[in-house]
Structure formats: structure tokens, C-alpha cells
Amino acid sequence: MLVVNNKCNQRKLVRDGRAEADRIITDRGAIKGVLIDATGFDGWDSLLALMGHLSFVKEHHKCP
């Protein structure tokens, strides 16, 4: 996951996207925008990986 902060013109490569998303939400209260480059995405390695992704989306896409 590449995290870009346009205000500070900073970029960093993050290995654990879930932990980074949690950190940003804790620090700022929300993630204002997400852009995903999926050009090289061939799908999930397993059903368990898909379920993990869907769980992440469900937990982080709750309306206040």
C-alpha cells in the first residue's frame, strides 16, 4: 500500500494496509479519500483472503 500525504508531499510504502488505515482513522477520525491502483491485481489467493478483505471493508465503512 502506498500512502500519499498531498499536504506534506510525503509518500511511504506500507506493508500492512489494515494497520495503517486503523492508525489514520485513529489519528484523524476518518480517511477522506482512497485511490487504489489495481492494474496488477489478479484476485485473492484464497477464500479466506477474500473474507479478510470483506471484513476489513465492513469494519471501516460504517456510517457515524
Image (cartoon, grey):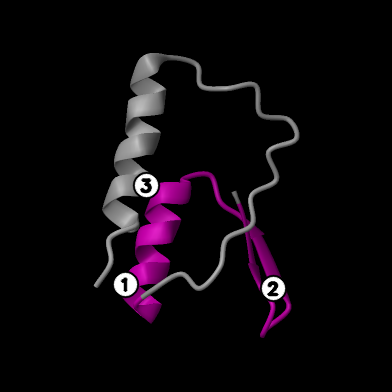
Q: Amino acid at mark 3?
A: Val
Q: Residues within 10 Å of mark 3 (few under 14, many from 20)?
A: few
Residue 5, placed above or below residue 18: below
Proximity of marks 2 and 1: CB atoms separated by less than 8 Å: no
Count residues near mark 2 (Cα–Cα under 10 Å), then give few for <14, some for 14-19, many for 20+.
Answer: few
Q: Quadrant of residue 62?
A: bottom left
Occupied quadrant, residue 50: top left
Farthest bottom residue in view:
7
In the picture, measured across the screen, residue 36 lies left or right of residue 49, that is right
In the picture, the quarter occupied by the C terminus is: bottom left
**Residue bounds of the magenta highlight:** 2-29
Which residue corresponds to mark 1? 26
Residue type, mark 1 in image: Thr
Discs 3, 2 touching: Cβ within 8 Å: no
Asked if disc 3 and disc 1 are in contact, CB closer than 8 Å, the reply is no
| Front residue (pair 55, 9) | 55
Q: Which mark is residue 57?
A: 3
Q: Which mark is residue 10?
A: 2
Looking at the image, which residue sits at the far top? 46
Q: CA distance from mark 3 to mark 1?
A: 16 Å
